[in-house]
Amino acid sequence: MTPSVRSSARIRIGSAPDSWGVWFPDDPQQVPWQRFLDEVAEAGYAWIELGPYGYLPTDPARLADETRDRGLAVSAGTVFTGLHHGPAVWDRTWAHVADIAGLTRAMGAEHLVVIPSFWRDDKTGEVLEDRVLTPAQWRDLTAQTERLGREVRERFGLRIVVHPHADT
């Protein structure tokens, strides 16, 4: 194994705001973002994902200061998408993704974690849509996810990673 392959093959373990119960940009029942950063650093992590956009500071300079002061680095941004709804949601989805991808790139990260939207409400548990995708929704999900991967790579130099979740 060459040194560059050996070093890139190492596993780096990080954490994310959801490990602290953070699912929303702003919720008084969640830990404040400063506490999350303090505790994730205190726990010994060196890497974090951004979590829901707006939970951590969205100003790259401020976020860079806050993470650097705690010995942290950003590994990825995180975005929830409803791409199984087809091309009709693309513009709204892209506007949200572009904000997150821009911050992710500015923080020096290389990945954007894409999580399909949940089929139930995060707070109430109310069922929002059928949990089983139709064949047409699968086609839309795969086609729009491929498009998202291309656009994010071309415009921001990031790679997407798809994170299927139990509730997606």
Image (cartoon, rainbow, N blue to C red):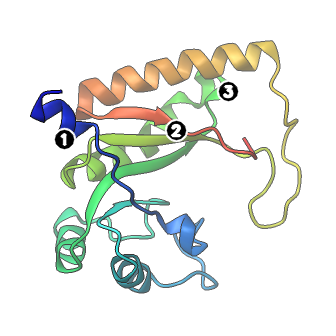
Rendered residue at 38%/70% (across/down): 56
Rendered residue at 23%/77% (across/down): 66
Crowding around mark 3 (Cα neighbors within 10 Å: few <14, some 14 to 19, many 20+) is many
Kind of residue at badge 3: His
Per the image, the residue denoted by label 1 is 7
Rendered residue at 59%/18% (across/down): 142
- Left or right relative to 138: residue 91: left
| Residue 164 higher or lower than 27, as above or below | above
Crowding around mark 2 (Cα neighbors within 10 Å: few <14, some 14 to 19, many 20+) is few
Q: Earlier in the sequence, mark 3 or mark 2?
A: 3
Image coords of residue 106 (percent x, y): 19, 52
Kind of residue at badge 1: Ser
- Left or right relative to 150: residue 53: right
| Residue 19 higher or lower than 8, as above or below | below
Marks 3 and 2, Cα distance to the nearest angstrom?
13 Å
Image coords of residue 15 (percent x, y): 44, 63
* Foreground residue among 166 and 104: 166
Q: Earlier in the sequence, mark 1 or mark 2?
A: 1
Label drawn at residue 92: 2
- Please identify the quadrant where the N terminus is shown: top left
Image coords of residue 35 (percent x, y): 42, 86
